Each structure stands twice: as C-alpha cells, then as structure tokens.
Image: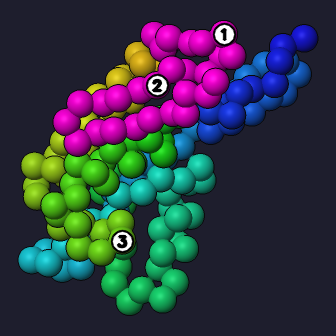
Amino acid sequence: MKKPPKFWEVFLFWHHDDQYILHMYNVYLISCGDVDNKKYKIGYTKNAVEKRVKQLKTGNFEEINIEQVFTSKWGSKIESVLHRNYSSYKLTGEWFSLTENHINNFLKECQNLDNFFEDWFKNSTFKSSGTPKGLSIASNLIISFETGT
C-alpha cells in the first residue's frame, strides 16, 4: 500500500485506491471594457471558465468575454507566474492592462510554463523524506517549497 501524499503533493493530487489522480485547472484570460480601455483578468479555476465568468458578472455592469483558456494540472502555479510577469501592467487585484502581444502570446506562455513545471517535477531531487529540496526559477519567477528536516 502506498504512503499518503506529502504536504506539497496535496496541491497536485488526491489519493484514491492507491492511485494519484491529477486535478486539472483552467487558466483563463478574460476581458471587459470597450476597445480603447480593455481590462484583462488572469485567473484559474477547477470549473468551466463560463461558470467563473457568470460569477464575475454578478455586480459587474460591463460585458465579460473569454479571450483564452489553457488547461493544466499546474494552473495555480502558471497563474501565479503570469501575475508576477505582468505586475508592471497591473491595474488592481487580478486585472491588468495588457498589450496585443501579451494576449496573442498567452497560450504560448502558458504552454512554456506548463512544460517547465512538468520538467521540474519529473527531474526534482528528493530527500529521503520525499520532500523536494527546493525550486528556484530565474528572472521574476520564484517558487519555493519548504525543505523540511
């Protein structure tokens, strides 16, 4: 029988019948506002993006449009990195003033980050406790896991 997942695995897997089953997330880019003053929100959800948009429409008088959606088990990590990368374009909360180039490259950036996290996870160095020694991403991206002793 397999041991239960370590604390860091809880974010990625749930345990059922000795098998780890991945949670998939939708990383989304949505927009609202007129053509000259569009605002973009970067987020993630386990649910359909349409359901999230419906929640956001409550109390919002502007129409919300789905621009791009990327599905990945690394959804929360991808969203976090995108927020850091676009921090200089931040308006408020998770809303950004993005360029056409950002919008056109959104899916490519998500795919690159997904590949990075997948490679990192497959090639991680593990201690005997099963906890990753750590992760550091160059540039603006810094994601770390507790070392544990």
| Prevailing secondary structure class for the magenta stretch in the rendered image | loop
Name the amino acid type tagged 3. Gly
Categorize mark 1 by other alpha carbons within 10 Å: few (<14), some (14-19), many (20+): few
Magenta-colored span? 122-149
Q: What x and y, as percent, mark residue 48?
A: 56, 54
Magenta-colored stretch includes residue 136 = yes
**With respect to residue 18, does 47 lie above or below?**
below
Q: What is the secondary structure assignment of the residue under circle 1?
A: loop
**Label 1 sits on residue:** 128
The residue positioned 34% from the left and 84% from the top of the image is 62
**Label 2 sits on residue:** 134
Q: Which of marks 1 and 3 is in front?
A: 1
Q: What x and y, as percent, mark residue 129?
A: 69, 16
Residue 111 appearing in the image: no
**With respect to residue 5, does 26 lie above or below?**
below
Q: What is the secondary structure assignment of the residue under circle 3?
A: loop
